[in-house]
Image: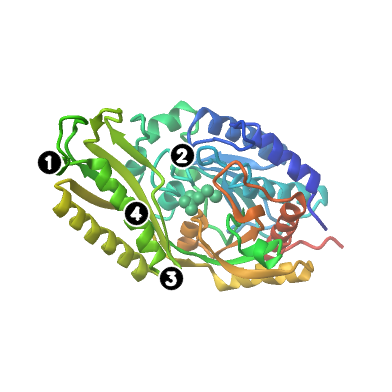
Amino acid sequence: MHINADRLQDSIDQMARIGATPGGGVTRLALSDEDKAGRDLLGRWLEAAGLRVRVDDFGTMTGSRAGARAGAPVMLASHLDSVRQGGRFDGAYGVLASLEVVRTLNDHAITTHLPVEVVNWTNEEGVRFEPAMIASGAVAGRFDRDHVYDRTDRDGLRFEDELRRIGYLGDEANRPGPASAYLELHIEQGPVLEDAGLAVGVVEGIVGITWIEVTCEGQADHAGPSPMPLRRDALAAAARVIYGVQSLALATEGAVGTVGRLALEPNVINTIPGRVVMSVDFRHPRADTLDGLVAGLERLAADIAAESGVELTVNRFWTSEPTPFDPAVVDAVQAVAAELGIPSQRLWSGAGHDAKYAQDIWPAAMIFVRSAGGVSHCEDEFSTPEDLAAGADVLLHATLRLAGRVRVE
Ligand code: HGY
Ligand code: MN
Ligand code: MN
């Protein structure tokens, strides 16, 4: 039994028209009009597939398919929100492949012993409302609701107000869970599977991630009369931080470091920048090494401040610990790939996913499919229809294995 690859590709292409960008990607930021449109479309599809749809107090959508008996469902999940000018597969592929699994079960009139649920998590990317995975983190008990509701975007708009504005402020009673098993199918977003010549990866866990905001407070001043030795140039200090982040990561085996967001004031040609605010994203498989990278950044900031007279603050505001997935669920995914004759390998995820917080409270695992060129979070993101179908077939049969299939005599 296979999923319907053409139907899956068509669903991905239809969803990609929402928030489409000129370069073939999508911008569907959490709680934006584009996110609302994507949610509305998914809701129609879930209902058309016979699922009972509910929305929780963070806007997370859950479609439920009854099993032969009551019990904690097998949860198939991912996210529809994207980064800015992102790809059409990150998140959406997992949600729509989960829907395709249900559509395939319907096509074959299959009843599972346990219920099956399809979940679209709110704000996985954490681009508009930092940090990432805030809805799944709240369900896992890491963030309280008021903290989430008070998060604001760059325009000062509040999470709760935007959730209400798009009509997806639901009820706490509708939160996803519990799950007998949680599966998330996702593109790899890195080069490992392509280098190995494999379509499918069995994900053993997610590396540790920490997000930091560095603020450089100098002195805005005239670009002409101000002698160089007297300046407190916030951007010159920030440039040393950016180079330092890269040096720290390059010097630490297995680490990555990124400055992805930067704002400077007043940002005009003939004024020395007075203020810079930037993000730092460090990742590593070990928590203690991650802490070491942050300590290195703090030492560097102190040195820059002492030499430049610019004040630097380092605010580590989010950490997602390294998270190994449930060995039994990981084994089930690997066994299913083998039974399907799909060669696979085990790997860890360098990208964060809601599966991290799912694993904190339920037995979870992920399935990856190959990313062409290993790129993601850009309009060039691509996976072939064949690879997308292979991943969805593994999800289908892992669901049948974990939820159990009622045999009709
Ligand atoms: O940041 C991440 O790794 C994920 O895409 N939110
Ligand atoms: Mn994702
Ligand atoms: Mn992403």
Name the residue type under label 3: Glu
> How far apart are the alpha carbons under marks 4 and 1?
23 Å
Which residue in the structure is indicated by mark 2? 171
Are circles 4 and 2 on residues that touch, CB within 8 Å?
no
- The residue to which callout 3 is attached is 253
- Please, is residue 291 above or below residue 174 in the view? below
Mark drawn on residue 243: 4
| Residue drawn where x is 69% and y is 68% of the image | 344
Mark earlier in primary sequence (4, 2): 2
Query: Which residue is found at the position 74% from the left and 71% from the top?
Result: 338
> Mark 2 touching mark 3, by CB under 8 A?
no
Q: Give the CA distance from mark 2 to mark 3.
A: 45 Å
- Residue drawn at x 39%, y 68% is 252
**Is label 4 in a helix, a strand or a loop?**
helix
Tell me the number on the disc at residue 254: none
| Disc 4 from disc 3: Cα separation | 17 Å
Choose mark 2 or mark 1, whichever is in front: 1
Residue 187 horizontal side relative to residue 225, left or right? right
Crowdedness near tag 3: few (<14), some (14–19) or many (≥20) residues, C-alpha within 10 Å:
few
Q: CA distance from mark 2 to mark 1?
A: 57 Å
> Which three-letter amino acid code belongs to the residue tagged 4?
Tyr
Identity of the amino acid at label 2? Asp
Pick whichever, 340 or 298, lies toward us: 298
Residue for badge 1: 230
At which x and y percent is residue 88? 63, 41
Please provide percent x and percent y for residue 264. 30, 36
Q: Is mark 1 within 8 Å of ligand 1?
A: no
